[in-house]
Image: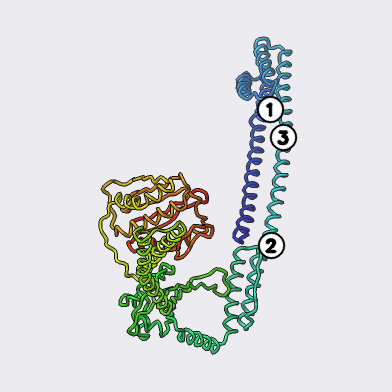
Amino acid sequence: MKIKTKITLGVGLLFLMIVILSVISAVYISKQKSDTQKILTANYNSLEYSKNMMLALDKISADATQIQTFRKNLALESRNITEIGEKDSYQDAVAHFENFLKTRNPESEKLIRNDLAEIMRLNMNAIVQKSDKAIATAQTATTWVISLGTICFIIAFTLLFNLPDNIARPIRELTESIKQIASGNYHERVHFRGSAEFEDLANSFNSMAEKLDEYQSSSLSKQLMDKKRVEMLISNMHDPVIGLDEKNQINFINDEALKISGLVREELIGKTAPEIAVNNDLLRELLRNAALEEKSEAPMKIFADNKESYFEQEIIPISIIPTGETEKKDAGKVILLRNITAYKELDFAKTNFIATVSHELKTPISSMKMGTQLLKNEKFGMLNEQQKELLRSIEEDGERLLDITGELLNLSQAESGNIRLNFTDCNVSALVNAAISNNAVIAENKEIEILTDFRTRESDTVKADFDKTVWVLNNFLTNAIKHSGAGQKIIISTERIKDKVRFSVQDFGKGIDPKYHSRIFDRYFQVPEDYLSGTGLGLAISKNFIEKQGGEIGLESEINKGSTFWMML
């Protein structure tokens, strides 16, 4: 609990008890005053009036003016009748007095005196009762005042002995600890419990002591040596490295980074990275990627030392936990460029090799196909059934080899960037119909119905290469037919989404396990459970074709619910 809360609660409770004590005292004093006033007003005056009437009655024989005195006090008494039975006595006194004035009978005078005596008796009894009530009220007030006063005393006594110690003890301990720190004992720590303010103060003090201890324990020469060791390590790295602090100032940059960026180390002093990037395209691109804090998938091509080099950029955020604290703080980031030129050159060599081999294979494979066609011609002689079966097998293998070499050529063109795209305004319906026409015979042979669902207008077009786009749709359709059972349906749909058109090919086959979705467009990848023949290149080539046209490609599939391959242009 905070010390402020303790003081507020203690003093507030004491204040509340004092207010209650004051209110109760005022109430009972007022009540006692009221009781006293009632005795004086209601009873004492009646006694006074009765006494005056007795005296007037004594002198009435000798002094006729005493009759007026009697009547006056009798009238005052009529307005001060407060007790039970007093009214009856008053009325009797009035009747007896009137009779006395007429008859002057001593008997009437005696009755008057009896009536007045009864009034005095009633008021005297009332005075005694009200006096007892006032005494009881005073006793109750005394009890309440003593009880509340005792509680106030206990609270005040508790505050007097505990509160100063609760405040002074931590201050005393803190003072002693500060003296220890001042004398060089940086291992000193303080621990306060029970008060949030003093706990925060203790934590701040301990953090300061820990930092002072760390500072004292460290050696400046050792720090300098460690700093130089790190600088030499970074400087001798073969990959470009740039270090930025939390304010985007360049903390370090090695020679490789200076070489590829064209920067001079002296020009970096006192400047932030954004200021330098204004006149440096490479640094501007690196900072843009660093701000996004994501690794770029495409390698960066940089021309330096009269040659092209390829680099992969990686952003490494740096977070530290300051001494004595528990939360991480941003301390900047490191931009690392990995030189992958050698791997890229090997990849180019592989692509060129595949392209060359594929191109060289197309001619003999085409010759093989032509030879099989000639052999099938009966003009050159009749073939028996075994020879026809062998010829059919050769023809199928030749067709498959020709398809593979065609796919390898397409892939090598896409990877090398030599693919030629002829962009035109392609009618959406024409693209779909062309793909359906190319696969109609295959679908019919398997008794598969191809349905269309056009949610686009008949005049809608996309900016694309007609042949390459139809090739992708062909690939989608071929795969759908291959993985659909006889009698099933395939749905080709088109849908306009803002300024783009989405083409979808949906089948109702066994579907693709979600764990393979991320790899389905990789080169040579085939679903392990899929026992159908294929090269694993069709979807990879499709992805290249669509992305080269600035589009998107994807898959939606669940086990036993079929698959939907889509592209967006």
Q: CA distance from mark 1 to mark 2?
A: 60 Å
Q: Residue 5 vs residue 109: left or right?
A: left
Using the image as rendered, state which of residue 168 and residue 414 is in the foreground. 414
The x, y position of residue 496, in whole percent, is: 33, 49
**2 or 3: tag closer to the N-terminus:** 3
- The residue closer to the viewer here, 99 or 418, is 418
Q: Residue at x 37, y 55 (%)?
A: 474
Is residue 90 toward the left or the right of residue 443 in the image? right
Q: Secondary structure at mark 1?
A: helix
Left or right of 183 on screen, residue 384: left
Query: What distance separates the C-alpha of mark 2 from that of mark 3?
Result: 43 Å
For the point 64% across and 79% down, the residue is 187
Residue, disc 2: 162
Please state the horizontal and vertical placement of residue 350, each as a whole percent of the image.
41, 75
Q: Closer to the observer: label 2 or label 3?
A: 2
Q: Residue at x 42, y 84 (%)?
A: 254
Amino acid type at image mark 2: Asn
Amino acid type, residue under disc 3 in the picture: Lys
Secondary element type, mark 2 = helix
Cβ–Cβ under 8 Å for marks 1 and 2: no
Q: Which residue is mark 3?
A: 133
Q: Quadrant of residue 90?
A: top right
Q: Residues within 10 Å of mark 3 (few under 14, many from 20)?
A: some
Q: Is residue 130 above or below residue 553?
A: above
The kind of residue on which mark 1 rests is: Leu
Q: Nearer the viewer, mark 1 or mark 3?
A: 3
Percent position of residue 149, x then y = 69, 50
Q: Which mark is residue 47?
A: 1
Q: Quadrant of the C terminus?
A: bottom left
